[in-house]
Image (spheres, grey):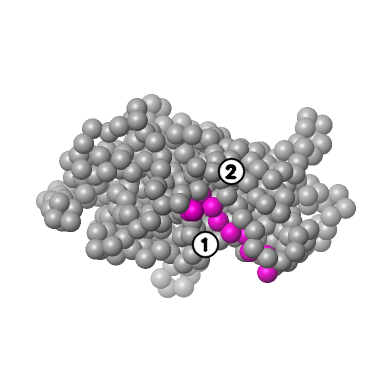
Amino acid sequence: MIRINRLFVLGVLLGILLTWVNPCVSEVFVQCPGDLNGDAIPDPYLPGGAPNPEYRANVKCMHLAAGDGYITMADGTPMYIFSFADLTGVPPDQAIEKGMLAATFPAPTIVADEGDEFYLTLTNVGMMVRPDLFDPHTVHWHGFPNAASIFDGVPDASVAINMGSSFTYYYKVVEPGTFMYHCHVEATEHMQMGMLGNLYVRPAQNKLPDGTNLNGFTHHTGYHYVYNDGDGSTYYDVEYPIQIGSFDPEFHIANETVQPLPFAYMKDKYPMLNGRGYPDTINPDPLPPPPANINRGVHSQNITSLIEANHGQKILLRISNLNVTRFYTLGTVGIAMKVVGKDSRLLKGQNGEKLYYDTFSVTLGGGESTDVILDTSQVSPGTYFLYTTNLNYLNNNNEEFGGMMTEIVVK
C-alpha cells in the first residue's frame, strides 16, 4: 500500500503540473452542437428561454476520459486497469480532475440510434499510478463503416490523443447492430488492461409511426427490434449487453509495478462477463469501490450481467467478445437462443430469406458479436444460466465455481 500511495502522490503532482503550470497543455475542449457550457449535453434552449438555434434532436454527445484505476475481482483481489470513464455532464475545467483514477471496466456503454450524429470527445487524463507512462489513447468503433479514417482510432491512419489533450470523434450513425469499442494504441496491452466497452445501435424501424404494417406484423409505438427486419421477426421486450472478457493477473501486476510485460506468456485466469466474475455478475448494483480507497472511492464496475424478464417476454442478448487471448463459448441450459444477427448484420440470404437458427451455444473470437433472442414463453418461470462451456473458465483464478457465468431469471 505504501508503494501505491507514493505513486498516487506522484501522479497527482503530475496532474497539478499539467493543469496549473502549463494550462495550454491540458486544455479540455468538447465539440457538441447545441452545447452551451462544454459539458457534452446539448441544450435545447438558450439561458433566456428562447430556442437554441444550434440544437438538433438527432445530435448525441458523450465525453470520455482515458486513464487508469482499479477494480475488484470476484475473489477479492484488487486489479490495476487502464480504461475509460464517463465525463458527460462534467464542466471542462473539472474534467481532468474528475477523470483521474476513475477508469471503469468495462468502459461506459455507448448506445446510439440509427440516423444519429454522434460526437464523442476523448480526453487523455494520464496514468496516476504510472506517471512514467505518457501513452496516447484512441477510441476505435470496431466494425463501424467510418467514412473518414481520421475518426477511426487506428493510429496508423488517424490521430491519437496525447496526455492532457482532447479530441472529438464524429460519426454519422448509418447502420444498426451490436458493435464494441476499444483503444487501438498498443492494442494488445491496452485491451488486456481493460480499455474496451459495449456499444450498440438501435434500428430506425423502432421509430416507425404507430400502426405501421410490417409484412403482416403491426408495429406499435414503443416496440423494439434488433434490426430493420421488415416483418417484426427481431422484436424483443428487454435487452442486455453481455461483453466477454478475461484478465491475466500477472500481466496487470507487471504493469502496475513497472516490470517487463509478459506478452508471450499471457494467460487469462479471470474470465468475466461485463467486467465481473460469478457471483458478482448477478449483483444488480455497482460493485463497492476497491479496498483501501485506492481509486478515490470510484465505483469502477457498474454493469450487471443479471438477465431478468417476465414470463412471455423476449430477451435480446447483445453478446460481444473483445478478449485478446482466446475464443470463448457461451451456452444455456433449458432455454434456447435464436441467433438473428452476427457481427452487426442481420442473418439473411442473398434473396432476403431469414437465416435465423436456434442453438444452445455460441462461440465468439476476439472482435466478434452475436445477437440472440430468448423466448421466455417457451419455458417455465425460474432461474436459468448463461455460462461458458469452457469449464476450466468457471473460476476466479484459483477460486472455483465462479468466472464466466450469470443467471437468467424468468419471473
Local SS, label 1: helix
Q: Give x and y (percent) for residue 124.
A: 30, 46
**Magenta residues, as a range?**
401-411
Q: Residues within 10 Å of mark 2 (few under 14, many from 20)?
A: some
Q: Which residue is mark 2?
A: 389
Among the 4 quarters of the image, the one containing residue 91: bottom left
Q: Give x and y (percent) for residue 62.
A: 43, 54
Q: Give x and y (percent) for residue 191.
A: 39, 39
**Residue 29 visible in image:** no
Residue at x 34% of width, y 36% of height = 189
Q: In the displayed image of the protein, which residue is found farthest to the right?
A: 216
Q: Give x and y (percent) for residue 303.
A: 48, 58
Q: Residues within 10 Å of mark 1 (few under 14, many from 20)?
A: some
Q: Is residue 137 magenta?
A: no
Residue at x 27% of width, y 33% of height = 261
Is residue 264 toward the left or the right of residue 316 in the image? left
Q: First in sequence, mark 2 or 1: give its number.
A: 1
Quarter that holds the N terminus: bottom left
Between marks 2 and 1 in the image, the one whose residue lies nearer the viewer = 2
Q: Which residue is mark 1?
A: 282
- Tell me the kind of residue under disc 1: Ile
Local SS, label 2: loop
Is residue 400 toward the left or the right of residue 314 in the image? left
Residue at x 46% of width, y 60% of height = 280
- Tell me the kind of residue under disc 2: Thr
